Amino acid sequence: MPRKILNKIIRHLDSNELESFILDRQSGELCYLAKEKGKIIKIPDNLCQDFFSAVENALASNHEGEKLFCLFSSRGKINITLRHHFEDGKQKISAEIEKTEKLIGFTQIGFDLKQQKQIKTALKQKKGLIIAGLPAGNGLSNLINSLAAEINLEEKSAYLLSNANEYKIDGLNFIQLEYPFENDLRTKLAWLEKKDAEIIIIPEIYERQTALALAKLANSGHLILAGCRSRDAFSVLNSFLKAGPTREILANFLLIISGRQIHRLCPHCAEKYSVNNTEIQSFAKRFSLQKKITEALIPKRLIRSIGCPKCHYRAYTNKIGLFETLTFNKELRSCQNISEIRQKGFDQGFQPLIIKALSAAKNGLISLQEILSLKL
């Protein structure tokens, strides 16, 4: 199965524009058709050879054939139809790429009922900061847009500032950002402040100066929904606190969301099994926990998938979101530093990603091996 190699090629190119490609084994040239014009790029020899070998094995060696593969990116599902054929005596592989532009909705993205209630409450506020922090490749853009779609935008002045309008949302005014994006973003934020925009949505921010500008906008009466690349909720908070005075920044926070995309177990080949001592030791070592604590956290019996024709022997069907949410109240906003916020957050029932992941495993959604592979 050339899935991993396909992912490398997709990342190698402009995946937003890619529609089809043809790879010539003899020349190692990849000709791909983008929305505007065709382009040619030279693929490294080892990648080219590995790709052909994998496709030949998948389609039956030395025979013409066709096969559909499904990939998943931050933009959603990508269907790739591979065709192995001969043209003028040369072996070639062509691919038709069908990308899903459909927005994954708020209720389908992976939030539990408690988190949905917390988020809906925050989205109804007239001012404040709602920040989502995810690592690259975990669906940050989809998350921000799904939250935006949940806001009642009727009779409200709402603006999306981005370099690309991936999802069209009714009632949301799109403002194109020009390169360099962060400088242009701060300029347009200043313009929106004068324009009295009620809601400002930014799929991704990179610099502390922008974080400080957003905090000031929230303080002056705007609802800010923004995304950033971060490991967990407290890393998001730390990035903002480094941008300015702690008390002033915290006064504007409503909610922080952090999470990961995870592989959901195939229900058709799922089976119960007893967790062994080796898995417990691996878990304890991976997350730096004592063995007794690990034994208390991990249920004795869990679910795993072994692979079947319906999941193409991958043991999973698709990806779902796994999230942690940190809601701010007066007590948290009065804290002096992150350590104090962390302690009070846990006292008030905050559940980190590792606990949410174990809960998902207990409910048969993901495997223990999937949790071990997460970079938490």
Image (cartoon, rainbow, N blue to C red):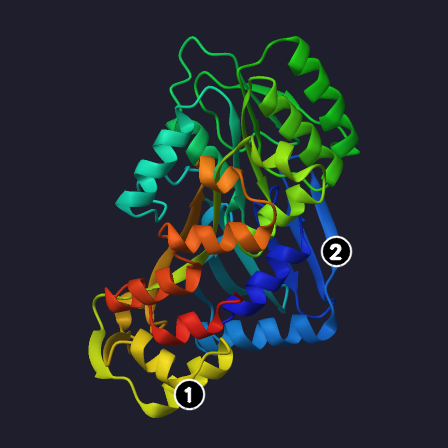
- Return the mark for residue 41: 2
- Residues packed near mark 2 inside 10 Å, few (<14), some (14 to 19) or many (20 plus): few
Relative to 233, say whether 51 is above or below: below
Inspect this view and state whether residue 217 appears: yes
| Tag 1 residue | 281
Q: Nearer the viewer, residue 276 or 239?
A: 239
Relative to 303, say whether 181 is above or below: above
Quadrant housing residue 362: bottom left
Q: Position of residue 251 (x, y in %)?
A: 56, 31
Q: Secondary structure at mark 1?
A: helix
Residue at the image point whose x is 52% and y is 27% from the top: 128
Relative to 3, say whether 244 is above or below: above
Quadrant housing residue 27: bottom right
Residue at the image point whose x is 36% and y is 75% from the top: 368
Inspect this view and state whether residue 328 appears: no
Q: What amino acid is labelled 1 in the image?
A: Gln
- Residues packed near mark 1 inside 10 Å, few (<14), some (14 to 19) or many (20 plus): some
Q: What amino acid is labelled 2 in the image?
A: Ile
Relative to 192, say whether 270 is above or below: below
